[in-house]
Amino acid sequence: AQNIRSIATAPWLFMPGLAVVIAVMALNLLGDGLRDAADPYNK
């Protein structure tokens, strides 16, 4: 409950958190793509 109040009183904290989430998801998808491209046994 306190974290929701922090976002309400300091909305600039939301954007860095969102950037981290997007970066992690992008790296995860990139890693999956590289694994699929490099796997010779991929069906």
Image (cartoon, grey):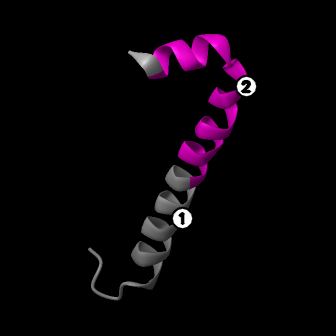
Report the magenta stretch's main SS. Answer: helix
Q: Residue at x 60, y 11 (%)?
A: 8
Q: Residue at x 54, y 61 (%)?
A: 27
Residue at mark 2 to residue at mark 1: CA–CA distance: 28 Å
Q: Tell me if residue 40 comes above or below residue 10 in the rendering.
A: below
Q: Residue at x 47, y 60 (%)?
A: 28
**Measured from the top left, where is residue 19 in percent x and y?**
65, 42
Numbered disc 1: secondary structure: helix
Q: Residues within 10 Å of mark 1 (few under 14, many from 20)?
A: few
Quick check: is 6 in the magenta stretch?
yes
Q: Residues within 10 Å of mark 2 (few under 14, many from 20)?
A: few
Q: Are marks 2 and 1 in contact (CB under 8 Å)?
A: no
The numbered mark at residue 41 is none
**8 with respect to 2 (left or right):** right
Task: Check disc 1 and give the amino acid type.
Answer: Leu
**Measured from the top left, where is residue 31 in percent x and y?**
48, 69
**Measured from the top left, where is residue 6 in percent x and y?**
56, 19
**7 with respect to 38 (left or right):** right
For the magenta stretch, what is the residue range? 3-23
Q: Residue at x 48, y 16 (%)?
A: 4
The numbered mark at residue 12 is 2
Q: Which of label 2 and label 1 is nearer to you?
A: 2
Numbered disc 2: secondary structure: helix
**Measured from the top left, where is residue 32 in percent x and y?**
43, 66
Observer-nearest of 12 and 38: 12
| Quadrant where the C terminus is found in the figure | bottom left
Q: Earlier in the sequence, mark 2 or mark 1?
A: 2
| Quadrant where the N terminus is found in the figure | top left
Task: Check disc 2 and give the amino acid type.
Answer: Trp
Mark 1 sits on what residue? Answer: 30
